[in-house]
Image (cartoon, rainbow, N blue to C red):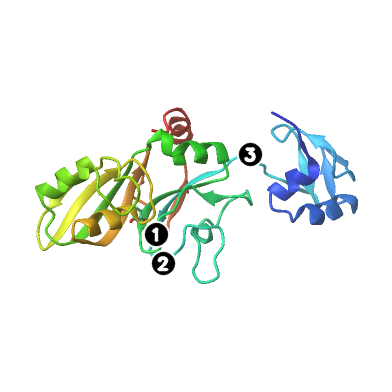
Amino acid sequence: MTQIRLDKYLADMQFGTRSEVKKLIRAGKVQLDGKTCKSPEQKLDPEQAQVMVEHRLVQYASYEYFMLNKPKGCVSATEDHRYPTVLDYITDHLRGDLFPVGRLDLDTEGLLLITNDGALAHELLSPAKHIAKTYEAVIDGIVTEEDVKAFAQGINIGEKKPTKPAELVVLKSNVISQIRITIYEGKFHQIKRMFEAVGKQVLELKRLSMGALKLDESLQPGEYRALTDDEITYLRERGA
Ligand code: URA
């Protein structure tokens, strides 16, 4: 494991800003492998080192991964003035640099990956990777076989190019319909705009999966859990 500075190590583990943790270290409150260390720039291997702050052992994590069943009414951002953010729901974590991988609308529910692994996030969000995202939705209007064909061909939602082919499955066709849809891109309000383009309105939207990662249906909206080692490996190896 590459070595990092003691002040970065403590800032990563939320002991304060870089300048706050420097003060803590210079004040002699930090022990590294059993000895007081007053140098913020001291390098250490985070996987091996034993660090104590005020005689309490620090638990370190390089990366954290959580799946949140995002509830309605919170924003997919790290901070916001008006609404709670998805990070407000992740109450038990070590890292201070978590962020949501992509966005769900304020009124959309379902699977959201929250991590500090920028490389994995980049892989999952890269338009070139065509990562599949599957949603279930309640639609105001009768969803028809023509809609299924139109979605498979690509829909004009007012952008330069039509949407990429999407797989639409009609679960119940009525004045209020239920559908499942898989898209391979992530344009702003994409699914709502696709249905608007065929004269229908999305009433409820819930994401079920993103690439290899599936929503754990035992999670109620607002609940989260850490990803299992298998889920992390699977996602890294076969994001799509
Ligand atoms: N499409 C939408 O319209 N909204 C979302 O939150 C996700 C996909």
Q: Is residue 97 left or right of residue 100?
A: right
Q: Residues within 10 Å of mark 2 (few under 14, many from 20)?
A: some
First in sequence: mark 1 vs mark 2: 2
Residue 217 is at least partly visible in this image? no
First in sequence: mark 2 vs mark 3: 3
The circle on residue 43 is none
Q: Residues within 10 Å of mark 3 (few under 14, many from 20)?
A: few
Q: Secondary structure at mark 3?
A: loop
Cα–Cα span, label 1 and label 2: 9 Å
According to the picture, the residue beneath numbered tag 2 turns out to be: 73
Q: Nearer the viewer, residue 118 or 163?
A: 163
Q: Secondary structure at mark 2?
A: loop
Identified by mark 2, the residue type is Gly
Q: Picture coordinates of residue 196 (x, y %)?
A: 24, 59
Q: Secondary structure at mark 1?
A: loop
Q: Residues within 10 Å of mark 1 (few under 14, many from 20)?
A: some
Q: Nearer the viewer, residue 195 or 11?
A: 195
- Judged from this view, the residue extending furthest toward the bottom is 82
The circle on residue 62 is 3
